Image (cartoon, grey):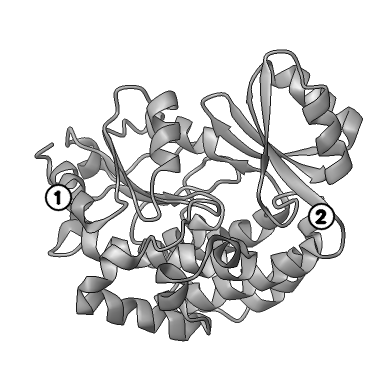
Amino acid sequence: MLQPFAADRWQTSQVIVVVAPGQGSQTPGFLEPWLAESALRDHLGALSDAAGIDLVAHGTTSDADTIRDTKVAQPLIVAASLMTAAAVLSEGRRSHVDGVAGHSVGEVAAAAIAGILSETDAMRLVAERGRAMADAAALETTGMSAVIGGDEAELLARLAELGLQPANFNGGGQIVVAGATDALAQLAENPVAGTRVIPLQVAGAFHTRYMQPAVSHLEDFAAGLEKNEPTLPIWTNRDGSRVESGAHYIDLLVGQVSSPVRWDLTMESFAAAGVTGIVELAPAGALVGLAKRALKGVPAVAVKTPDDLAAAIDLIDGNA
């Protein structure tokens, strides 16, 4: 159930949400344009130290195979979102934002932006998440495919026949499915009528039962983190609802490693809340694309490089 913003927020005509992307959005060298500014480079260096990974190198010189590795990709994506959030929300602009949400691993960045976790703990958590999910993926040969179009009920029935699971309900007619690679091959060979099946270059069946070993490990790790109450409205991918408790949000974030991402329901909550603008943090593009299909007419800005900051700031400040 969607919970409303504070009364004063409903009195404004502008409702802006900042969103943080998930795994698969990274590309080689995507952070290079950001690091010309020393403050941002120092920020990324601090996030690297917290994660125990050289994210400056991975964001600038590492190749596609290196940054596809789950252990690298997840901290890199969250660090990119936090670094660009600092640029987008500077000069008091955070007070002009009405909420935050993240897609899959982007929920870790959202937790830090909302003040639930410190940036240091967010980076520690995402580094542990990446390692735990990589270890779980190594136990069996699995993968993921995006399915575009078709009837959802027919697709879900076909997945059940093949022992596959829906991993991401992304909205806009896109569902990512996951499971054993031979079953994914069968789906591609005999797709449901009206669908297109696109294999994804990922290491395993994320957000499915195959990730349960990672959940058990992360529950123990997250228990030692300090959790605060959110200082911005924040939505969960579990069911698209707004979460009031910081500790509960982290519980949901950890548990969702083995359950589907319901970004479709998150966008439905945006619509119900009257969202009038969306700003996607780096490495941006995927969530703006989904929003344009599911939230037609809502302005959305993908902050891919520093050149996109002006458009994002104009949207947040009401000048778009």
Location of residue 59 (image quadrant):
bottom left
Image location of residue 260, percent across then percent down: 67, 44
User: Between marks 1 and 2, how big is the CA–CA gap?
Assistant: 42 Å
Farthest residue, direction left: 319
Image location of residue 272, percent across then percent down: 40, 29
Q: Which residue is rendered at x = 40% and y = 70% of the image?
A: 60
Location of residue 141 (image quadrant):
bottom right
Disc 2 residue type? Tyr
Disc 1 residue type? Ala
Given residues 184 and 116, the one toward you in this image is 184
Query: Mark 2 sits on what residue?
Result: 210
Given residues 103 and 302, the one toward you in this image is 302
Q: Residues within 10 Å of mark 1 (few under 14, many from 20)?
A: some
- Looking at the image, is mark 1 or mark 2 earlier in the sequence? 2
Secondary element at image label 2? helix
Compared across the picture, whether 259 is left or right of 57 comes to right
